[in-house]
């Protein structure tokens, strides 16, 4: 899918690891989900609305996505518990703890809830940094998916480019230690300072 859209994927590092692991990454674009899944099968945590999106929703459901209703936090404990169960079962679960996409020149704080699942399951967290660049290596926001823009707007912009490079930097895993605030801060620092 990435190749068809003119996106070249580069992966720095090895696979996510064996057994259950929580993969956490910065979030720039729809490209991120596809890129993470190209490394190894990943069950993504996604906002509930994604389940209703044409094509994307069907793919998300088929790959075992865990959906969270961001408007009603009463369901959050169930999502954390479901994520912990998936991790204990050996699944690779991916999440963008910023909670939304950013353009790449800025980022948001990592929300702590998904890190509780890793702690509850006793499974490591694998930080991943995602970067988008033009063929000459210059960082670009061309693939970003922000604001009121639709998925199709972003896709059309990417298709108009000669090529877009997506680099995943798989950083060392973090052991499930401390509390969720500390673990989230360690993962955020790893992602934001990696180059």
Image: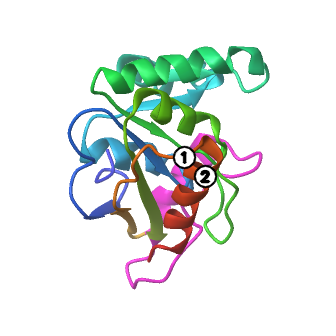
State which quadrant residue 99 falls in. top right
Q: Residues within 10 Å of mark 1 (few under 14, many from 20)?
A: few
Which residue is depicted at the point 51% across and 46% down?
Answer: 30
Which residue is depicted at the point 22% across and 51% down?
Answer: 15
Q: Quadrant of the N terminus?
A: top left
Judge whether residue 54 can be spotted in this image: no
Instruction: State yes or no: residue 154 in magenta.
Output: yes
In front of the other: 102 or 175: 175
State which quadrant residue 163 falls in. bottom left
In front of the other: 128 or 20: 20
State which quadrant residue 14 falls in. bottom left
The range drawn in magenta is 133-161
| Mark 2: secondary structure | helix
Residue farthest to the front? Answer: 178
Q: Quadrant of the C terminus?
A: bottom left
Say whether residue 172 is left or right of residue 115: left
Q: Compared with residue 166, is residue 66 higher up or lower down, i.e. above or below?
A: above
Chief secondary structure of the magenta span?
A: loop
**Residue 178: mark:** 1
| Mark 1: secondary structure | loop
State the image coordinates of residue 152 (x, y, percent, origin top left).
58, 42
**Residue 182: mark:** 2
Instruction: State yes or no: residue 1 in magenta.
Output: no
């Amino acid at each position: 899918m990435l190749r068809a859209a003119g996106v070249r994927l580069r992966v720095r590092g090895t696979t996510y690891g064996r057994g259950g692991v929580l993969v956490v990454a910065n979030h720039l674009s729809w490209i991120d989900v596809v890129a993470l899944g190209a490394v190894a099968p990943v069950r993504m945590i996604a906002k509930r609305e994604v389940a209703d999106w044409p094509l994307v929703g069907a793919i998300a459901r088929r790959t075992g996505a865990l959906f969270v209703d961001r408007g009603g936090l009463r369901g959050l404990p169930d999502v954390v518990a479901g994520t912990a169960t998936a991790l204990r079962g050996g699944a690779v679960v991916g999440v963008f703890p910023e909670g939304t996409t950013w353009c790449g020149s800025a980022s948001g704080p990592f929300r702590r809830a998904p890190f509780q699942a890793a702690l509850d399951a006793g499974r490591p967290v694998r930080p991943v940094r995602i970067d988008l660049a033009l063929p000459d290596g210059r960082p670009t926001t061309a693939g970003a998916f922000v604001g009121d823009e639709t998925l199709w707007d972003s896709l059309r912009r990417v298709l108009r480019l000669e090529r877009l490079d997506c680099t995943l930097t798989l950083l060392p895993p973090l052991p499930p230690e401390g509390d969720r605030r500390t673990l989230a801060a360690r993962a955020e620092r790893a992602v934001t300072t990696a180059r």
